[in-house]
Image (tube, coloured by chain):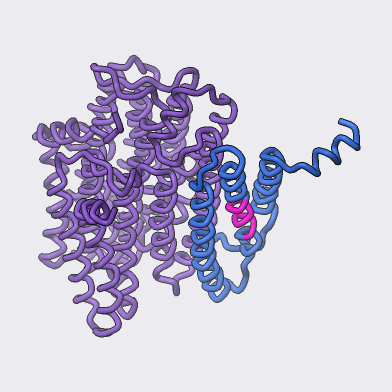
Chain colours: A blue, B purple
């Protein structure tokens, strides 16, 4: 693909563009979870994964199925992510009060 | 439309009652701040009512709320199992020193237990991918909080943090897998997905990737290797009552949802007349599950050998048991499914019993170390005998119920010619004997260190112990009713 063709491809977004975007977001989320040691950053990685799934749902709903199912799922997932993060932050706050750190590597009293 | 919703609601009574219980428990806690007993009775009554209402659904087979959930024998079986566990756990909680120490927050505890039960009920019946995700999240969110319920204890906080990170990650992976399935088939209900997969040419690679991502979600719920990392930490750190609940009910709900997902979407229609199912053409997902099963039971049993904390040991043992039960799913037959259901009934009594003993001893000695069990057989003969029976049953030796559970699993495996898997399972059972007996040796063949006085229990505590102990023995000899009920319960609702 020549640069001009590539630009043309970028200008006409279709299903593939969104799928590539969501795959990138998904990979970044996994990367954040594996590489970050701060509990908050790990949680943000998880949010990225959820949003990657959302993009998939909406793109499929728009380009391939033609029904609203995917968009409804996405709305539910957004609510779900909010609920999950509310609880996660409460737990992280509690961890900070107990351990004085939110580094997931230092919180390791329970071990084999 | 309105009439249809009302009609569907009449099949949704157990879930409705549980929802009401959640609300009532919270409000009651606001009004009667100092009366933790009352709130525990309210939640007990709620769960008992829900369980009773489930028994009235026996024999029904229909879809409710336009394909969102199914009320069928399979769901009813698991709902009964979950309700029973929930009742037993509420009774445990009344006698647990850990939970009683935080009686000011009793409303939170019992309403979350009811919410957890509700989430598992929905998991057992969910037939829509969105419903599955939501039910699983309801279960998970409640259990994250409950795992960290004794939040002053560092162990408990750490357990809940590890739980939520692993849990949120695997549900994220599962959701991504579901989004790919949705893209491949254009449907969110399991029947539509199945229709599209059977009729159309779907990309094999995409389906494989999606299935593996979805297995990550299920694998986390049933704590299958390699998605088991949270299990030992959470089981050790969480209050014993919650650990016991997670190890039985959460696993049961995860299995129910997993079996329904795989058998409803990735098979070729209804089972054959001899009760065997056919996997989707060219996509033998049961081989993936067979590998998971072998890994799960082998790792669970081998690592359990090195444990010194009894709760952690039971965590690895519960991982191993998930491996045994996966064998029943692998064989792809009604017989295998029935064996899984039988195993779950047996597992409920023996595993809850083992955790109950751990709780009783921890109440008195404040320790869950295997070393603190030295001489326990003489300090409290009742505890000693009960533990012997529960552990022999967990190993799977006759004449206990555990033997019956394993027997039916192995028969189903041999019938379907999965001989190598049966051999691996049998070898694993032998390994498990070693670490169970290690605890029993401490109880009977070692002298107590330090405090060697007799331990006494209240009549209520003894009754609960007997309620778990007697079925563990009885079902080893008289198992016909469970087998019959399990055989009748493999029926899953499907659109013709």
Q: Is residue B431 left or right of residue A65?
A: left
What residue do we see at 29% from left, 71% from top?
Answer: B23
What residue do we see at 54% from left, 59% from top?
Answer: A78
- Residue B16 sits in which quadrant? bottom left
Q: Is residue B140 left or right of residue B466?
A: right
What residue do we see at 40% from left, 59% from top?
Answer: B143
Q: Confirm whether residue B356 shows in the render.
A: no
How many numbered marks are there? 0
Residue nearest the viewer, comparing B340 with B429: B340
Residue nearest the viewer, comparing A30 with B325: A30
Q: Is residue A68 magenta?
A: no
Residue at the far front: name it.
Answer: B1
Image position of B430 with respect to B367: above or below: above
Query: Where residue B34 appears, x then y in whole percent?
Result: 25, 84
Image position of B365 with respect to B387: above or below: below
Stretch in magenta: A44-51
Q: Is residue A108 left or right of residue B372?
A: right
Q: Confirm whether residue B55 shows in the render.
A: yes
Per the picture, the main secondary structure of the magenta-coloured stretch is helix
Q: Is residue A47 magenta?
A: yes
Query: Where residue B240 appears, x then y in whole percent?
Result: 33, 60
Quadrant of the frame with the C terminus of chain B: top left
Query: Where residue B376 appears, x then y in whole percent?
Result: 24, 56
- Residue B95 sits in which quadrant? bottom left
What residue do we see at 32% from left, 65% from top?
Answer: B450
Residue nearest the viewer, comparing B201 with B430: B201
Q: Is residue B74 left or right of residue B471?
A: right
Query: Where residue A21 appears, x then y in whole percent?
Result: 70, 46
Image position of A79 with respect to A13: above or below: below
Residue at the far right: name it.
Answer: A3
Image position of B195 with respect to A77: above or below: above
Residue at the far top: name it.
Answer: B417
């Amino acid at each position: 693909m020549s640069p001009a063709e590539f630009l043309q491809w970028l200008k006409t977004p279709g299903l593939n563009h969104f799928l590539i975007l969501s795959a990138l977001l998904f990979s970044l989320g996994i990367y954040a979870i594996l590489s970050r040691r701060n509990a908050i950053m790990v949680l943000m990685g998880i949010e990225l994964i959820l949003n990657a799934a959302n993009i998939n749902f909406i793109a499929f709903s728009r380009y391939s199925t033609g029904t609203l199912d995917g968009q409804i799922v996405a709305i539910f997932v957004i609510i779900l992510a909010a609920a999950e993060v509310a609880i996660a932050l409460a737990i992280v706050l509690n961890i900070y009060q107990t351990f004085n750190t939110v580094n997931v590597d230092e919180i390791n009293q329970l071990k084999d | 439309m309105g009439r249809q919703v009302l009609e569907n609601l009449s099949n949704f009574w157990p879930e409705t009652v549980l929802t009401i219980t959640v609300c009532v428990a919270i409000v009651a806690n606001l009004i009667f701040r100092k009366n933790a007993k009352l709130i525990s009775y309210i939640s007990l009554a709620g769960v008992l009512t829900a369980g009773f209402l489930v028994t009235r659904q026996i024999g029904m087979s229909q879809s409710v709320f336009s394909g969102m959930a199914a009320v069928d024998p399979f769901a009813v079986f698991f709902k009964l199992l979950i309700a029973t566990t929930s009742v037993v756990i509420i009774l445990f909680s009344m006698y647990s020193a850990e939970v009683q120490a935080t009686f000011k927050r009793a409303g939170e505890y019992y309403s979350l237990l009811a919410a957890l039960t509700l989430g598992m009920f929905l998991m057992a019946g969910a037939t829509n991918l969105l419903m599955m995700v939501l039910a699983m999240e309801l279960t998970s969110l409640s259990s994250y909080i409950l795992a960290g319920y004794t939040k002053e204890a560092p162990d408990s906080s750490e357990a809940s943090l590890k739980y939520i990170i692993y849990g949120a990650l695997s549900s994220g992976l599962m959701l991504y897998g579901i989004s790919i399935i949705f893209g491949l088939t254009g449907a969110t209900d399991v029947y539509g997905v199945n229709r599209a997969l059977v009729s159309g040419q779907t990309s094999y690679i995409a389906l494989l990737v999606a299935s593996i991502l979805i297995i990550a979600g299920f694998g986390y719920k049933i704590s299958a290797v390699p998605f088991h990392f949270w299990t030992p930490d959470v089981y050790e750190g969480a209050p014993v009552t919650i650990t016991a609940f997670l190890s039985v009910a959460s696993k049961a709900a995860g299995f129910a949802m997993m079996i329904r997902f795989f058998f409803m979407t990735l098979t070729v229609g209804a089972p054959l007349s001899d009760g065997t199912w056919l996997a989707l053409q060219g996509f033998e997902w049961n081989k993936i599950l067979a590998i998971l099963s072998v890994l799960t039971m082998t790792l669970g049993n081998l690592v359990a050998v090195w444990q010194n904390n009894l709760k952690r040991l039971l965590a690895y043992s519960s991982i191993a048991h998930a491996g045994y039960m996966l064998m029943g799913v692998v064989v792809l037959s009604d017989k295998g499914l029935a064996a899984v259901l039988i195993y779950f009934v047996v597992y409920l009594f023996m595993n809850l019993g083992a955790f109950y003993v751990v709780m009783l001893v921890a109440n008195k000695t404040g320790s869950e170390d295997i070393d603190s069990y030295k001489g326990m057989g003489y300090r409290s003969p009742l505890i000693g005998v009960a533990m012997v029976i529960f552990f022999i049953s967990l190993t799977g030796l006759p004449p206990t119920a555990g033997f019956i559970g394993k027997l039916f699993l192995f028969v189903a495996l041999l019938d379907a010619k999965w001989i190598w898997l049966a051999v691996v399972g049998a070898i694993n059972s032998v390994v498990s004997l070693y670490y169970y007996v290690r605890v029993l040796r401490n109880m009977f063949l070692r002298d107590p260190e330090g405090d060697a006085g007799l331990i006494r229990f209240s009549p209520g505590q003894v009754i609960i112990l007997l309620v778990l102990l007697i079925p563990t023995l009885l079902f080893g000899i008289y198992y016909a009713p469970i087998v019959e009920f399990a055989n009748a319960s493999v029926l899953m609702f499907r659109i013709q």
